[in-house]
Image: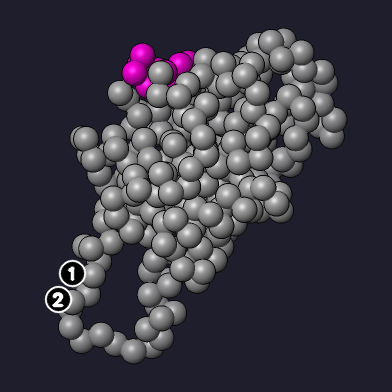
Amino acid sequence: MNASKILQQLMQQAGGSQKGGSSSGVDVKGMLGGLSKQLGGGSSQGGGSSSGFDMKSLLGGGAMGMLVGSKRGRSMGGKALKYGAIAGVGVLAWKAWQSSQAAKNGNAQDSNAQERTAQTEAEGERVEALSGEYQERRSLELLQAMIMAARADGHIDEQEQALITEQIDALGADQEMHNWVEQQLKAPLDAQALAREADSPQAAREMYLISVAVTDDQNPMERAWLDQLASALNLPKEMTDELERQAQQAG
């Protein structure tokens, strides 16, 4: 399975989208036109794309954009899909932990450097610092978190599931990855099962942060999912607040 390749492309494209373009070389407008024809989309309002999709809601050549903006016209307005939070999920989750530690310790200086080092190591590595099977595993965890969060309001129907899988394939997914995505789009939403995949506190923070990036906390169903996930991941309120703040600031 090539989950790390898919996640890296999505992160890179998120960075490009945040700057108003795509760093991947993918012809997003062309893909939009094709998707619009398949979905029967009309023209959008308010200066959006002529394909019927909000350009700001698109990510990954269409796949992630379709996860968060359905053909039923769910308006994202660039608010819920936080490109910067997806592009820098590892660094931002780590910064959230550092900020929470600073707030907890105040201005007190910990004289035990060895203890500080041990505590830092116990938190786990950031996704971008991992390699090999460890990076593949974390990538799967984050992709699973994204898909579950995007499905939290139940707006993705069978036709859209097929098109999302098709767009993931366009990013270079192998057959095993294709089958996995199909399975995730149909699997029951289970915060406890998802949380069990987290192998470190850093993994848990990244899973929560990337979920925040593709949800609208003003939507009651999505807010409820975030709360369930936070509880399952054993993330305290001060940590989830900091992760949400980092996501909002990243934009």
At a point 44% along the width and 37% down the height, the residue shown is 144
> Splitting the image into 4 quarters, where does residue 235 fall?
bottom left
The circle drawn on residue 118 is: 1
Is 146 in the magenta? Answer: no
At a point 20% along the width and 86% down the height, the residue shown is 111
* The one of 55 and 194 positioned closer to us in this rendering: 194
In this image, 45 relative to 245: left or right? right
At a point 21% along the width and 35% down the height, the residue shown is 133
Residue 93, image x and y in percent? 42, 57
Stretch in magenta: 169-178
The circle drawn on residue 114 is: 2
Looking at the picture, which amino acid does disc 1 mark?
Ala
Q: Residues within 10 Å of mark 2 (few under 14, many from 20)?
A: few
Residue 141, image x and y in percent? 38, 40
Whether residue 30 appears in this view of the structure is yes
Q: Are marks 2 and 1 in contact (CB under 8 Å)?
A: yes
| SS of the residue under disc 2 | helix
> Splitting the image into 4 quarters, where does residue 68 fall?
top right
In this image, 40 relative to 150: left or right? right
